[in-house]
Image (cartoon, rainbow, N blue to C red):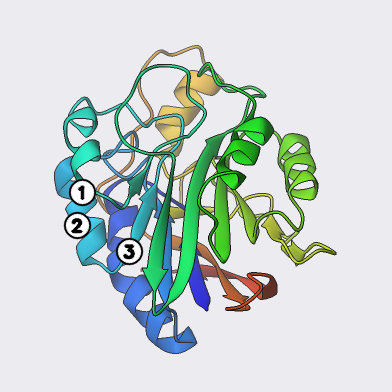
Amino acid sequence: MKVLFVGDIVGRVGRRMVKERVPYYVDKYKIDFVIANGENASHGKGLTKNNYYELIDAGVDVITLGNHYNSKSETESYIGRVDNLIRPINILSEYPGDGSAIYDIDGVSIRVTNVLGSAFINENVSSPYLSVLEVLEEEPATIHIVDFHAEATGEKKSFGYALDGKVSAVLGTHTHIQTRDYQIFPEGTAYISDVGMCGFADGVLGFTKESVMNRNLFGGTGKFQPPDEGRGLFSAVVMDFDDTTGKCKEIFPIYYLEDEK
């Protein structure tokens, strides 16, 4: 089973990159299943219903979220009516939708779980590790892919090692910078600290450099602004899993940067 996991989609440029590159890589690598993190897809924060359908129409099978799961108020009204939008499983507030779900792909069961980290994340959450252990006591799936939406690399790596052999993959999201530590742990679990992002390449984290610098360096209070156009970046990983054991046989990154115009 070959799975494409797409990193955080940021704004209109990120959505364009998904529409342009996902079909290409699905064909090139004979992908069976596509997962994408969409928590920044709507103007850099949250996911509207229209943008949800835009990503599904682009070829994404399942969309995961993160700490901005509720940044667009309309998400709460539609997330419970769709079966392929996964919000963090360990949030403490009451919220509709599911944090983990199972899908049947040509007779192979794939579970997708979305978890928020606890370090440097403002959202109040229960233990990420114990939350996944509870999921493992539920209906089993042959392949289990965990999107660990977290800030700290040390927390991500520890989480990955703790789940080695218990799940098929632990994929870090949230920091928007693709790391080079993709690997398969000794017991067959695929890992990367951060898959990276899809979005505007010539700014900061998919946003205009001016808007981020204004807040981070100069004490401004304005919002980060994703541009509507510009050179795009597409970040993802491809994984190949054993259909019987669920162990990962191969993982490699995709880092596609458009040429400058």
With 164 as the anchor, is 2 left or right in this view? left
The local secondary structure at tag 1 comes to: helix
With 103 as the anchor, is 238 left or right in this view? right
Give the amino acid at mark 3. Val
Q: Which mark is residue 244?
A: none
> Looking at the image, which residue is at 45% across and 86% down?
30
Choose between 18 and 186: the one closer to the eye: 186
Occupied quadrant, residue 43? top left
> Looking at the image, which residue is at 50% across and 51% down?
139
Instruction: Name the N-terminal-most of marks 3 and 1.
Output: 1
Where residue 238 appears, as percent x and y from the top left, is: 56, 72
Residue 86 in view: yes
The crowding category of the residue bearing disc 2, from other C-alpha atoms within 10 Å (few below 14, some 14 to 19, many at least 20), is: some
Choose between 120 and 231: the one closer to the eye: 120
> Looking at the image, which residue is at 57% across and 78% down?
243
Look at the numbered discs 2 and 1 and tell me whether their residues touch, using CB distance below 8 Å: yes
In the image, is residue 32 above or below residue 90? below
Q: Which residue is mark 3?
A: 60
Q: Which residue is mark 2?
A: 54
With 155 as the anchor, is 213 left or right in this view? left
**The C terminus, quarter of image:** bottom left
Give the amino acid at mark 1. Asn
Give the amino acid at mark 2. Glu
Instruction: Name the N-terminal-most of marks 2 and 3.
Output: 2
Q: Which residue is mark 1?
A: 51
Where residue 4 appears, as percent x and y from the top left, is: 48, 69
Q: Residue furthest right?
A: 186
In the image, is residue 215 above or below residue 58? above
